[in-house]
Amino acid sequence: MSQGETNALRLEVLEGNIALLTIDQPNSRANTLGQGVQDDLERVLGELDALHRRTPLQGLVFRSGKPGMFVAGADLNELGRPAPGREESRRRVQRGLDLIARFESLPYPTVAAIDGACMGGGLELAMGFDIRVASTSPKTVLGQPEVKVGLIPGWGGTQRLPRIVGAPIATEMICSGEPASADRARQIGLVFDAVPAERLLDEVRRVLEWARASGEWQEARQRKRQPVGLTEEQHSFTFGVARAQVLAKTKGQYPAPLAAVEAIAKGCNLPLEEGLKAEMEAFLPLVGSPISRNLIAVFFMDQELKKDTGVADRNIKPRDVNLVGVVGAGLMGAGIAGAHVRRGIPVVMLDNAPAALEKGVAANVKVMQARVEIGRMTQKEVIESLARLSTSLSLGALADRDVVVEAIVENEEVKTRLFQQLQGILRPDAILASNTSTISITRMGRAVKNPENFAGMHFFNPVDRMQLVEVIRGEKTGDQTVATLVALAKRIGKTPIVVRDCPGFLVNRILFPYMNEAMALLEEGASPREIDKAATVFGMPMGPVLLQDVVGLDTAVYAGRVVNTAFADRAVPTRILDELVAAGRLGQKSGAGFYVYAKGPKGADDPALEGFLQKVRKGTRKIGQEEITDRLFLPMLTEASRVLSEGIVRGPADVDMGLILGIGFPPFRGGILRWADQQGLPKVLEKLKKYEPLGPRFRPTEQMEQLASASKGFYSG
């Protein structure tokens, strides 16, 4: 019997006088808890009070009307806006806390029936119910991911979760932001039980009757109201370890996880009401902060890429891809083959050397076993994946393939010779993609009969961990080819960005000025450690000198020549890489490059490097960290502006996401263009003027000057 209906909520009374509240936000794939839905919740609470006064209710069940989606959390569109002011933020947070408290104090038992994602504010609301029962659907996950957008739970999550699952587990869940499956949630006591979705409502009603008969609902409320009760020793150990782990992981650059630890530590041994005050004081400074706004912006940019088809015409549909071929069984070829077979796509991997094929298969076995060890694959899935991987020495094995990815040596002559050989073998409609990182797709496309079916598909190393794929459009590449490769990349769990053909494409083109400047700084007198430290303090996962060693100095020399030749006016000629390569110092793979690697992959300083530096040094002046930082990132920024101005990508978000996913540009800065916007382009131009005597790489682009003079940014221009 329908008793009342709001925009997002439907209230019914079931047999036995059980209230059933269903959330189903209209015109949305997800349920979120924005201000409008909070209005609905307040109205429904009033209706529940009125119902109970007429005929006492025996319980309340809260569920979602969207199969596989419970409540995704707060409305990030609201949180991503500039902070409304401390007192207004406090009022909004208090409103959410009051709503949950009203559900928590209803005079009858309450149960949340969770089918699908129950995240952030959704979980905080569910924890305001006496009992939670989840479906066993793979879509059912429960978590507090707020730290991933620079926030902490603000509606009681840092206080109720420790009281429900214990402080150590709650702290780990909140500080990592990683969700728990329904089964894991059952094991830790976050949900009472996990049952198949089709049985969920029946099970919830059974649990509700048990809770009412046993009085468990009142006991559950009492446990949430009182302190956790850690001893002084337990408290010191739990939060001492948590702080150390957070600092080791974030290097202090992400304030939210540390704020979460402090909120839990301050509140867990107090009554709930006092703990919620501690959470509020930790939460408010983060709302609308630059870091939180950047991380929310990155989240939305990522969501847009997930929806992007890669082409402007939405009527263009990707072709079906059922069979894939990979030519080359080296590091990249094996990784590309593995990415496909793990997602259910049969692959034939080719090489002209049997030993290379054996090594490529072994590399995939190793990657999959590592996934088994961390719980991301089962042995059954490993066996099924490997069954989809076949090998061959003959190009004829590619005759039935829908897509063929070339991943052989980075040599244009060798690649085009292969493409010519494939012309009589591949189906006329087959798509041929090159994994090149530097060579022109347009130029190589002249070696194929159907250039509209030829494109770049540039994976990043290591393929099993790197999310980005650049889909490179040559001058004659067809829209359907682009759409097909974009869809294929998404199908294998990657994030594709479409890039127009140019030297270095997107990521490497913007990365090379950074790498080149590091070598120039070395030759001017900076030490490798000073340069790497400036980069990591800025937020990069590793410095540019260590990165050269990881990539391989011989590879860096070759790739650098391609890009530096194309953009000779802003490349700095340096000799140090050539000197080291000539001496056989190729980086990690040879045991020595700028650093030595006898004791591990992080590298140790090598006194022998000084002799090489003396041969190429132009000076020995002390270069401060601020100058090093400016000189590493400002040339990247001017190159990023050129990429945007030339239409190499379709917008600033493609540039920023490409660098975040491709080289680990710090997400908390929002990407290099958003970083510039936050500083203000007039201020950026002032900095560039200081370094302009060093060369054109520090000269602002026309785009930057126009935006600065109009007081606009890359995102507001």
Image (cartoon, helix red, strand yellow):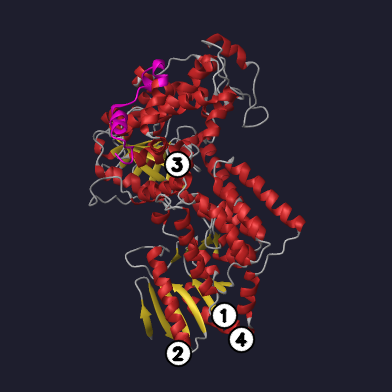
Please tell me the numbered disc located at residue 54: 2
Element marked by disc 2: helix
Q: Earlier in the sequence, mark 3 or mark 1?
A: 1
Type of amino acid at the residue the image marks with label 2: Arg
Type of amino acid at the residue the image marks with label 4: Ala
What residue sits right under mark 4 in the picture? 213
Relative side of 184 to 517, left or right = right
What residue sits right under mark 3 in the picture? 336
Residue for point 39% across, 69% down: 39
What residue sits right under mark 1 in the picture? 207
Element marked by disc 4: helix
Element marked by disc 3: helix
How many residues crowd mark 1 within 10 Å: few (<14), some (14–19), many (20+)? many
Mark 4 vs mark 3, CA separation in Å:
58 Å
Magenta stretch bounds: 690-717
How many residues crowd mark 2 within 10 Å: few (<14), some (14–19), many (20+)? few
Out of 66 and 469, give the one closest to the viewer.
Answer: 66
Nearer the observer, disc 4 or disc 2? 2
Q: x%, y% of residue 445?
A: 28, 31
Relative side of 529 to 199, left or right = right
Q: Earlier in the sequence, mark 3 or mark 2?
A: 2
Relative side of 226 to 711, left or right = right
Type of amino acid at the residue the image marks with label 3: Ile
